[in-house]
Image (spheres, rainbow, N blue to C red):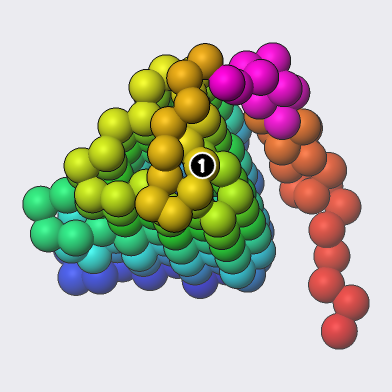
Amino acid sequence: MPIYALGDLVPSIHPEAYVHPDAVIIGQAEIGAGSTIWACTVIRADDAPIVIGERTSIQDGAVLHTVPNFPTTIGNNCTIGHLAHLEGCVLKEGALAGSSSVILHRAVIGEWALVAANAVVLNDMVVPPGALAVGTPAKIKENAVDIEGQRLGVESYVARAATYRETLRRLD
């Protein structure tokens, strides 16, 4: 897997994290225990840190980036869906960014909140705990999240990492 230092900025990946061989990690990125980084994900922490907590899934094709003075911080037990783009934002415990969603500068996604597929969370927007953000630009629907369903999704990706670590092999 391509993991790059950028000058003095060196990624820190917990030994219990799983990083797919086709993911790219650059710069001041930190990945917690039990987290999974899937194929074609790009984590580029050149302007500020990117911190990913424990047991968090960054799924295929996601792009995590920063801007000067605005790190990207993702809590424990989060799910970042396929092709999502996160930049200079904060996701709290258990938050879910749906497939192809975009979460921009200084936005805060509360505990166990959900950003729907294709939604765009604009700069400085706050999605309250347990709320659903849907649409472009995102609108908030309070208390609309199936938190237990999100917990099951987290567990499935934590378990999947063990299978990939033990059995993934390239055939070409």
Q: Quadrant of residue 83?
A: bottom right
Q: Position of residue 82 (x, y in %)?
A: 63, 56
Seen at 84% across and 65% down, the residue is 169
- Residue 54 to residue 70: above or below: above
Q: Main secondary structure of the magenta part?
A: helix
Residue 166 appears in view: yes
Instruction: Identify which residue is drawn at 17% across, 49% down.
Output: 70
Residue 24, compared with residue 49, is above or below; it is: below
Check the image and report above or below for 138 versus 46. Answer: above
Quadrant containing the C terminus in the rendered view: bottom right
Whether residue 63 is in magenta: the answer is: no
Residue lying farthest left?
Answer: 69
Q: Is residue 128 left or right of residue 151?
A: left
Given residues 38 and 2, the one toward you in this image is: 38
Q: Position of residue 159 (x, y in %)?
A: 77, 32
The amino acid on which the numbered mark 1 sits, given as a three-letter code, is Val
| Residue denoted by label 1 | 134
Q: Residue at x 55, y 55 (%)?
A: 118
Q: Could one spot residue 28 in this view of the protein?
A: no
- Report whether 1 appears left or right of 47: right
The foreground one among 35 and 120 is 120
Q: Position of residue 91 (x, y in %)?
A: 38, 34
The image quadrant where one finds the N terminus is: bottom right
- Which residue corresponds to the image point at 66% horizontal and 19% vertical from the top-left? 146
Horizontally, residue 156 falls left or right of residue 41, namely right
**Which residues are the magenta region?**
144-153
Classify mark 1: helix, strand or loop.
strand
Assess whether residue 152 is covered by the magenta stretch.
yes
